[in-house]
Image (cartoon, rainbow, N blue to C red):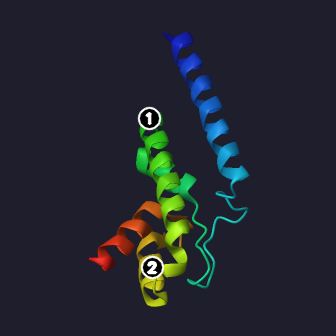
Amino acid sequence: MDQFLADYRLRGTKVKTKLYMLMLSIGFIANSPVAPAHAEAFPLYNMDTYCRDLAKGDFAKDMECGEKEAGAYSKLQNMWASIPERRKIECHNVAYDPSTGKGSYALHLQCIQKGKK
């Protein structure tokens, strides 16, 4: 059983490493864990910390969260220019916690979509 857990953790680390490398190659993860001060700029959230805290040590939940964040990031990036400035600011305030640096593209996207209805 110990060997199984060690193998599982190793595979998980390799999968996360590959996912991070992919995200880095498309500019997903920024060097800074904090979002930009101006909402008109595309936000840079520390989704890794957000997902780890949300998953509470559950690797599968962490990976699922990361996949949702990556999908939301892509959707937000594609629609960013068409979102009204006021809505960007409102949703940034919902999705980002300045005291921790954690943020969620999924929450930001959800806020944007609710504003369109």
Q: Is residue 116 left or right of residue 79?
A: left
C-alpha span from label 1 to label 2: 28 Å
Q: How crowded is mark 1: few (under 14 residues within 10 Å), some or many (20 or more)?
A: few
Question: Is disc 1 placed on a helix, strand or loop?
Answer: helix
Task: Identify the residue at image location x=63%, y=78%.
Answer: 36
Whole-percent x, y for residue 5 in the image: 52, 18
Q: Which amino acid does label 2 sit on?
A: Asn
- In the image: residue 64, left or right of residue 73: left
Residue visible at 62% across and 83% down? 37
- Residue 41: x and y in percent read 62, 80
**Is 88 placed above or below 96 here?**
below
The residue identified by callout 1 is 60
Q: Where is residue 112 in the image (x, y as percent from the top left)?
A: 39, 74
* Residue toward you, 104 or 98: 104
**Which residue occupies 66% across, 37% down?**
18
Quadrant (top left, top right, bottom left, bottom right) of the C terminus: bottom left
The residue that disc 2 covers is 93
- Answer above or below: position of 52 versus 33: above
| Residue found at the far bottom of this picture | 86
Mark 2 surroundings within 10 Å by alpha-carbon count, few (fewer than 14), some (14 through 19), many (20 or more):
some
